[in-house]
Image (cartoon, rainbow, N blue to C red):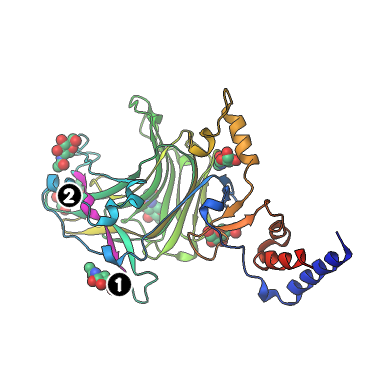
Amino acid sequence: MTPHRHSLQKLILSLFTLFPWIVIAFPETSDNRCDCYLTNASSSNYFTTHKFFDFRSLSQYADVPGPIADPYDSSQALATSDYFLSDDWTEYWGVQSWNNSDSVDAGTAPILMVNSPNNIYIENNTDASPASDTFMTMRTLRLEDYQSASEFESISQAYHYASVRMYARTIGAPGAVTAMFTYKDSGDPTQLTHVQESDLEIRTMDPPNVVQYTNQPSYTSQGSDIPASTRNVSNPGHLDWTEWAVYRMDWNPSSTTWYVDGESVASIEFQTPRDPSMVIFNAWSDGGVWSGNMSVGNEAYLQVQWIELVYNSTGSAKTTDKRGEGESLERIERRAEASCVNVCSMDDTTKIGTPVLLQGGASGVLGYVRLFGTVGFWIPLLSMALLFW
Ligand SMILES: *[C@@H]1O[C@H](CO)[C@@H](O)[C@H](O)[C@H]1NC(C)=O
Ligand SMILES: *[C@@H]1O[C@H](CO)[C@@H](O)[C@H](O)[C@H]1NC(C)=O
Ligand SMILES: *[C@@H]1O[C@H](CO)[C@@H](O)[C@H](O)[C@H]1NC(C)=O
Ligand SMILES: *[C@@H]1O[C@H](CO)[C@@H](O)[C@H](O)[C@H]1NC(C)=O
Ligand SMILES: *[C@@H]1O[C@H](CO)[C@@H](O)[C@H](O)[C@H]1NC(C)=O
Ligand SMILES: *[C@@H]1O[C@H](CO)[C@@H](O)[C@H](O)[C@H]1NC(C)=O
């Protein structure tokens, strides 16, 4: 390093000390330039893939469909708009039309529940000073003959650890559950643990500031609850779930941790899902003890401005494509780790959904970003100047 450069570095340092407002952020980048994503906070981890679903500016699709009285017709309803037929949506999510007719019984699930594509739609945001033009609504409503519900599931069942976030609120009548969860069913109903889940659930009959977080199954084969599997937690700052907030669930190998607006609210190690899973969102009720019984004519909604996921997949292209003959999975993973040159963040961005580059080794120039922490934005520019000094 020449004396010149050395003194320039000193100058840069003192500039940041003297003019801290110059400090902006890490440079924005795009997903195709990110080798991996590092999440923040206590459950921080690396993931290979990022997806962002933005429902905030879709007014060309906005339309609130009327209810469909007949349960069968509602399950057969068409998509509510072309958005839900677009590749952006259908490549990742499957809108459901299953029903609970084979489990309806007077005790645990007294009401016929039918999932309907008619209950998932884009709606104009008519809030006072709205934060978006539109959002996506998932509706559940109680009709004379049944409960109409909504659910979409990830097409992929290969999520293997993920940080899932939604900017959302739940509003409406008591007697519904809105949820964001991972789901894996081994298909052997004789095993209590045939289902593995990490759940975030809001029960509209609960006080409007408490949310339920659970690693399923939450009960034993004798039917008793397992306290270690679940938490009933107040939102930070008495924030109601009727207000917009970022709900985040970090499913990691040894625990699942949940955040509301960046604040850690629950973390459960017990029974953390082990196997590759799908990701599901829903709004439902079956009249049972857990969901409550919605009165006929009432409705409740999960409304979502955006969904963001950073995740790993088993058998994802990023690992298998490069698999050498006879190479073990661990070795591939080690190699993948070693090849994560451009480390990105979805947390340190000022523009939701757009990654920023935390660390990039290729040019060497961005190495300064690490050195100077959040002052990254100007460092590359000044470093470029340094190259021509
Ligand atoms: C939604 O908002 C857009 C833009 O303001 C408007 O053109 C459209 O008619 C609205 N749609 C509905 C269903 O209200
Ligand atoms: C409920 O699901 C069963 C099994 O798939 C199907 O036969 C039945 O038609 C469905 N009922 C309604 C109301 O959609
Ligand atoms: C959660 O706690 C609240 C009281 O803070 C209670 O009213 C509610 O029933 C509880 N929910 C569950 C699912 O236990
Ligand atoms: C992590 O990032 C989120 C934004 O995604 C932010 O709200 C939160 O405060 C950050 N947490 C920490 C510990 O930096
Ligand atoms: C649920 O509500 C309906 C009417 O809204 C009522 O007929 C029914 O008895 C209720 N069921 C339970 C289990 O409370
Ligand atoms: C995701 O995959 C990367 C690359 O294989 C690995 O370094 C990282 O630890 C994985 N993350 C989790 C949470 O398993």
Q: x, y percentage for residue 274?
A: 49, 34
* Span of residues in magenta: 113-125
Q: Considering the numbered disc 1 on the image, is that residue within a helix, a strand or a loop?
A: loop
Residue lying furthest front in this view?
Answer: 388
Q: x, y percentage for residue 322?
A: 55, 34
- Give the answer, above or below, for where 212 lies relative to 216: below
Residue 126, label in figure: 1
**In which quadrant of the rendered image does the N terminus lie?**
bottom right
Q: Considering the numbered disc 2 on the image, is that residue within a helix, a strand or a loop?
A: loop
Q: x, y percentage for residue 351?
A: 51, 65
**Toward the viewer: 358 or 194?**
358
Which residue shows up at 34% across the image and 28% down it? 187
**In which quadrant of the rendered image does the C terminus lie?**
bottom right
Q: Nearer the viewer, mark 2 or mark 1?
A: 2
Label 2 packing within 10 angstroms: few (<14), some (14-19), many (20+) = some
Q: Circle 2 sits on which residue?
A: 77
Q: Main secondary structure of the magenta part?
A: strand
Q: x, y percentage for residue 353?
A: 48, 59
Image quarter for residue 83?
Answer: bottom left
Image quarter for residue 189?
Answer: top left
- The amino acid marked with disc number 2 is Ala
Left or right, residue 198 beside residue 103:
right
Image quarter for residue 216?
Answer: top left
Residue 265 drawn in magenta: no
Q: Is residue 30 visible?
A: yes
